[in-house]
Image (cartoon, rainbow, N blue to C red):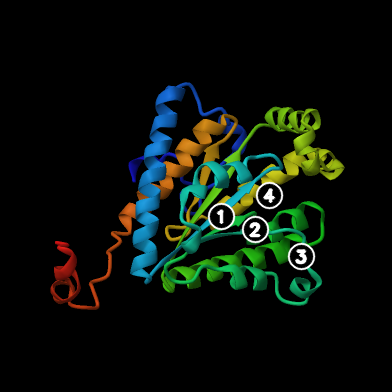
């Protein structure tokens, strides 16, 4: 787990996003070599997901959070999209529906949590309810603190029931966000993604950064860690996320279940006529 520790937020520690280089620092790997590694991790991820699905005793929840245009969709497509859809699904957390608003703020997260053997990816997550609501003054600090406590209890309950949790913050700079917005404006195939609200939210950039820092301090734990991933370079983001997910799945020591029938008896009974071995 040595690689993942470089990006993991220690429990009860304060991190300052302004001190973390969203470009990844000076020791970036070679881009061509990194892409080859990403393909290897994708192949390994498929194998590990197959074992998780077959074992059907544990599950994996992956939460992706970022500022707008931070790369959540791209991470799902280029890294996590290699998994078999039979045992993997994505849940996007948008503005709550009237039904969701009629329940407690974690109700919709409970509904979307993974079943045993399943990988679920939250595109945004239950943390939206201590981000937007806090930045825009919908909840006060006291309510936010209660929600942190509820989130910690929720994640512990999932872990105690066999769900492993990985939470990724895709860290981009304010300048990179604007460049990505401008690319959307220049590409008609992306116009459907353009929203004036995204530009208006840039006024709250510093408030969101502080809100994320509070989340990391309050809700990064041994069993539900937060990872801060430099994401200005999409290929580097993909390398970091894929390697961390593979590391954690390998550490779970997944085991294929034993056969439930006599394999040799079936060979003798059904394969003799077609000479299979």
- Tell me the quarter of the picture where residue 253 sits: bottom left
Nearest the viewer among 200 and 44 is: 44
Residue at numbered disc 4: 211
Q: Which mark is residue 96?
A: 3
The earlier-in-sequence mark between 2 and 1 is: 1
What secondary structure is marked by label 2? helix
Give the image location of residue 183, x and y in percent. 74, 29
The earlier-in-sequence mark between 1 and 4 is: 1
- C-alpha distance separating marks 3 and 1: 17 Å
Give the image location of residue 224, x and y in percent. 48, 59
* Residue 188 visible: yes
Q: Give the crowd class for mark 4: few <14, some 14-19, many >=20 residues within 10 Å.
A: some
* Residue 119 visible: no
The earlier-in-sequence mark between 4 and 3 is: 3
Residue contact between numbered discs 3 and 2, judged by CB atoms under 8 Å:
no
Q: Residue at x 57, y 35 (%)?
A: 231
Q: Residue at x 42, y 45 (%)?
A: 244
Between marks 3 and 2 in the image, the one whose residue lies nearer the viewer: 3
Q: Give the crowd class for mark 1: few <14, some 14-19, many >=20 residues within 10 Å.
A: many
- C-alpha distance separating marks 2 and 1: 9 Å
Q: Which mark is residue 127?
A: 2
Residue contact between numbered discs 2 and 1, judged by CB atoms under 8 Å:
yes
Nearest the viewer among 190 and 95 is: 190
The earlier-in-sequence mark between 2 and 4 is: 2
Q: Residue at x 13, y 73 (%)?
A: 268
Q: Would you place residue 26 above or below residue 243 in this image?
A: above
- C-alpha distance separating marks 1 and 4: 17 Å
Residue at numbered disc 1: 63
What secondary structure is marked by label 3? loop
């Amino acid at each position: 787990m040595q690689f993942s520790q470089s990006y993991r937020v220690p429990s009860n520690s304060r991190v300052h996003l302004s001190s973390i280089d969203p470009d990844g620092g000076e020791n970036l790997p070679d881009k061509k070599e990194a892409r080859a590694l990403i393909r290897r991790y994708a192949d390994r991820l498929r194998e590990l997901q197959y074992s998780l699905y077959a074992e059907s005793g544990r599950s994996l929840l992956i939460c992706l959070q970022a500022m707008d245009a931070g790369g959540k969709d791209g991470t799902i497509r280029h890294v996590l999209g290699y998994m078999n859809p039979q045992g993997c699904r994505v849940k996007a957390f948008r503005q709550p529906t009237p039904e969701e608003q009629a329940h407690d703020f974690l109700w919709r997260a409970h509904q979307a949590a993974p079943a045993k053997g399943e990988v679920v990816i939250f595109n945004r997550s239950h943390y939206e309810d201590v981000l937007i609501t806090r930045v825009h003054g919908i909840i006060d600090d006291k309510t936010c603190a209660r929600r942190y406590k509820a989130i910690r209890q929720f994640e512990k309950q999932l872990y105690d029931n066999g769900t492993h949790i990985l939470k990724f913050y895709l860290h981009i700079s304010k300048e990179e966000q604007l460049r990505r917005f401008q690319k959307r404006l220049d590409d008609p195939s992306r116009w459907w993604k353009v929203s004036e609200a995204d530009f208006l939210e840039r006024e709250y950039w510093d408030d969101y950064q502080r809100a994320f820092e509070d989340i990391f301090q309050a809700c990064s734990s041994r069993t539900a860690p937060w990872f801060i991933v430099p994401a200005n370079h999409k290929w580097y983001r993909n390398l970091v996320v894929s390697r961390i997910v593979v590391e954690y799945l390998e550490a779970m020591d997944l085991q294929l279940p034993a056969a439930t029938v006599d394999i040799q008896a079936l060979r003798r009974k059904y394969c003799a006529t077609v000479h299979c071995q």
